Structure formats: structure tokens, C-alpha cells
Amino acid sequence: MSEFTVNEMASMSDRLAVLENFISGLDKDELAGAAENSGHSDLLFLLICAFDIFLMQAGFALLEVGTVQAKNAKSILFKNTLDMAISMILWWCVGFGLAGGGASGQTGRDFFHIKDENTVSFIHSYVFAGTTATIVSGGVAERMNFTAYLLFSVVMVGLVYPLLAFWGWSSDGFLAQLGYKDFAGSGLIHLCGGLAALIGAKLVGPRFGRLKEENGTIQVIDLKGHSPVLSNFGTFVLLFGWLSFNGSSVLAGGTEDLILASRAISNTLLSIAGAALTSYFDDCRPRPDGRPSTHDLAALNNAMLAGAVGITAGCAFVQGWAALIIGVASYFVYKHASRLTVAFKIDDPLEAFSVHGACGLWGVLAVGLFAYPGLTDGTRSSTGLLLGGNGRQLGIQLLGAAVVIVWTGSVAFLAFKALDMLPGCQLRADKDAELLGLDFAYHDGFAYPDLNKDSVVIFNEVKAAERRARARTAGLKPQTKEVKVRSIGMHSGRKGKDSSRGEDSYSTQNSTSYSTNYSAGSPKPARFESKLGAVAPSPTNAGEEGAETAPSYMVPGDRGEPAATTPATAFIKVKSATQREEMKDVDGLDNV
């Protein structure tokens, strides 16, 4: 040990004196204020990001409403709006407390009453929980019973997701203690929501006309969305919120935390770009039949979302080049998962499982392959297998994915089955309501007025075709009967005897005549029992020819003639056996 000289000792004494004077001159109140301001910046950062993520609800609504048929636009918007509301109530009641520290760093467990120190954590974690529930909506769009869907959202937000968040993100959760890494929720959110959507889509069944099987080959009838513009705009709203979704998962707003958040955001953008360009180049390939290639905007939208889902788990643990590879691979995962879904006769209108479920699983596993040692704890156990790791991290990621699949799959399946057995909560919406449009049946008419006449015509044509098919199956000859329908709003008319036929008839200025096919011995459909009657377009006023409003249900009178109309939201239930037999004379009414 070297000895200090007298000069060196004096120099050190001077330096200590200077340091002591500096420390004594500091204002303790200012130091405390600086620490408090640092805490305030953390809270402000989380709040701003939570506002951005909340906007993703609008993105989901726009994407979904543009992807479905126009006749169900109101239904989709209504469902997504109430989904947000019910998620808030359930998260406040039980979800936040069950999630514990997995809910954006909550301290303790708050049920019903949220402590002041946990308020920001509550808001931030709520928007994550709402996203999980909304993913399911896309898989069951256009044909699921609204009440059953809302009750299933209760299960997702009140039970399924909170426990996953606790297991994977809380310091007390067993997955987190094992070293499971899912930075922003590829598995805990997207795999969870996507798998529930897949199970729901399978149990509810495909939309009418979506899948057709001939000679063992499945033909997919493309039910195109009515507005690619809304779908694309909704996609970008989602991606805007996604940047805060991934970036805010650092749960702090200090300088080093913001650097980590910036890395997560840049990796997210790289993955999205990689998936989008891969989709484009894949579309550029010539078709097998020699036709020129075309570019599918819906596939491009889903490719970008797939890239975002794939990088969500590892956005803070991988380097930029790995994020680009993850995005490219995410597109192919989405593409082949979509084909498998169709092969198993599952109709997923928004491809919720392919985008969120399959790519969420890939994102979880990608951490075990590409985790960079400089962005984890530096050990081989936490390093990706392709970067020199020993495979332990990949094994932990596999275990975490298995837990999500088993827990979500079992609870979702049991919940759907239980709801289907409850009176009034059957999973499938009424058959005729689905054919005519859920907007017409449940939401006071269509979102687009131009749909009124066309939808009614198509509906009546479908019902006539069904009756003719049943008649041929039963070996009966379809018959034709002319039915005169009095228009809505007509309070005056001349009723009298038709001398040539000896039966009552209506004669009004705006009467509409329909020729329909029927068979008196036609059996009822085995699966669905309709509550809707036949429908007909009608003028708004007796004196305004051509002016039309939403169709109304027509109820036959005592002798088979139309006697009254009811608003579009009403359901007609005919209990009289005589009335039921008379209604069979009008095409489309035997299902009442």
C-alpha cells in the first residue's frame, strides 16, 4: 500500500472541504421539490399515454365497422361503445384489484374504492383491459347475440385478463418470478383476446353465405366490408395508440425511462413497416392462374396490425434489425393462420385470431429467440436462443404462452357454453335479423338510408328461395300467391269484396303487390326460430310517391290480409295456431 505525501493529503483535505461547503449550501426543500417533480412527470407521462390508448377504442370501432357489411354498421358501433363502458365498471369493481401489481404498478389491491396513489395506475391499466375485451368483438361480428357478448365481456375483464396480468406482470406473479418477458402484452393481452375470439367464432358459427363446401372443398364467399376508407383510417388510429401502448409500458417518465420507451416505439414502427412491405411484395407475385396481381387493402391493414402485435412483447428487449425480422415473420404468421382458420370452417370477419392470437403467440416466442443480452440482465439464461442464449428464456416464454392458452381457452369455452344455455342469451342472433341486418332489427333502421329498399328486397328473395328449396326437398310443388300489402301511414282505403275471387282485398293509392312462393307443408328450419315477420318498404306519406322510410314488419289480419304494421324494432310473436297457419301463406312468415 503506497503512502500519501503531505502535499497529497493537503490536496485531499481541500477537496473534501469544497465538497462539504457545496453540500451544506444545498436547499433541502429544493431537493425534495425536485424529487416530487420527478414523480409528477411519471404520472403525467402515464396519463397522456392512457389518453392515446383510449383512442384505440375508436380505432377498433372504425376498423370493424368498415370491414363488416353496411347493414350491421350501427350494431358494431353500439357494441364497441357499450364494451368500453362495461369494461370500466368491471375493472373498477373487481378487475383492478385482482390484477394487483400487474395493473400498471398498483400498490396493494383496490376493489371498488381506488386510493389516490393508485388512480393513475387504474386509468392506465383500464385502457389495456378494455383492449383485451374489444378484440373478441371482431371474431363474432355480424351474428352474435348482443346480450351474450356483453356478458362475455364481463368474464374477460372481470376474471380472465386480471389474473393473467397478475401472473405475468406483478412481482408476486409466478410467471414474472420465473422470468417471463412480455413487455406490453403480446401474450397477456393479444393472445388472450385473439384466442377468445377464435373460440367464440367457432361456437357461434359462420355468417350465412360465408363458407360453402362442395365435394370436400371449402369455398370461401368473400363478404367484403362496405367501407375500405373507414377500415384504413381505423387501422391508423389503432397504430397511433399502439405507440403509446408499447412505449408507456415502462411505467415511468424519467430520462432513462423515456430512452427505453423511445426504443420500444422505434422497434414497433420497424416491425409495422416490415410487415406492411412484406404484404405488398407478396401481393406483387403473379397468380397461379396467370391473372395479373392485385393489392388487397384489407390484407395490408391486417399486416400492419400483425406487425404491431408481433413486436409488442419484445419491443424493449430486441434490437432494430430483430424488430424488422419479427415484423416480416408476423405477416406470414398472420397469412397462414388465416388460411388455417378457414380450413377449419371458422368465420372470423376481422381475422382477430390471425392478427392478435397467432401473432401474439409468435411475439411471445420471438423474445426467447431475439432477446439481446445488453437489454436484459446480460446472462445467457435471459438471452435469446439465436443470440447465444442457452434456451432457458425460450422455455419460459413457451410456458407463459401455454398458461395463457389453457387459462383463456378453458374459461372462454365454458363461459360461451354457459351463456348459450341461459334464456335469452343464446349465442346466435335471430336468423332473419341476421339476413336482413342487425341494424334494422335492433337499432331503429340502417345507418345508411339507401339500404332500406335493397335490403328488404334481398331479404324477401332469400326467404322465397329457402321456401322453394324446402318444397323441392319435401317433394311438393311450390305455389304462388299474390299478397297485397297496404303501405305504412295509409289510414284510408277502400275495403270490399272482389267479385271475381270472392275474397276481401285492399285497394289504396299506394298499395304494393308482392308475388311470393310458399308451400303449406314446408318444415321449419332446425336450428333457428325467427321472431321477425315479412317486411316491405313503404312511403313516408300517402301523397309522396317514391319517398321511402325504413321497412316495418307486417302482421296479417284475420283473413290473411295485412292489417297493421309495427315499428322496425318490435318483434312479432304469433301464438294463435290459426294465425300461424295463415301466416304460412305469405312467404317468409313461417318462421315466426
Image: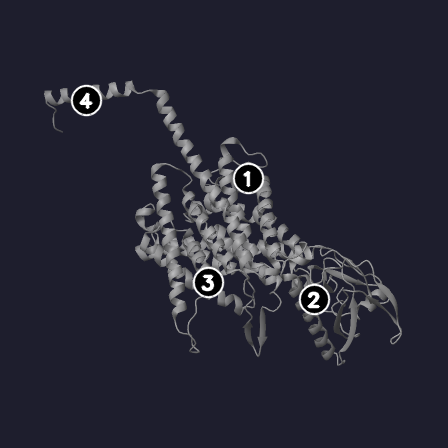
Viewer-side label of 1, 3: 3
Q: Position of residue 470 (x, y in %)?
A: 72, 75
Determine the image quadrant of residue 457: bottom right
Mark 2 vs mark 4, CA separation in Å: 89 Å
Tally of numbered tags: 4
For label 1, the SS is helix
Few, some or many C-alpha atoms within 10 Å of disc 1 (few <14, some 14-19, many ≥20)? many
| Mark 1: amino acid | Gly
Label placed on residue 15: 4
Q: Position of residue 350 (x, y in %)?
A: 53, 60
Q: Which residue is mark 3?
A: 297
For label 4, the SS is helix
Quick one: label 2 or label 1, which is nearer the N terminus?
A: 1
Residue at image coords 62%, 50%: 150
Q: Nearer the viewer, residue 551 or 269?
A: 551
Q: Disc 2, disc 1: CB below 8 Å?
A: no
Viewer-side label of 3, 2: 3
Q: Nearer the viewer, residue 54 or 100?
A: 54
| Mark 3: amino acid | Leu
Q: Which residue is mark 1?
A: 97
| Mark 4: amino acid | Arg
Quick one: label 3 or label 2, which is nearer the N terminus?
A: 3
Mark 3 vs mark 2, CA separation in Å: 36 Å
Q: Which residue is mark 2?
A: 527
Mark 2 vs mark 1, CA separation in Å: 41 Å
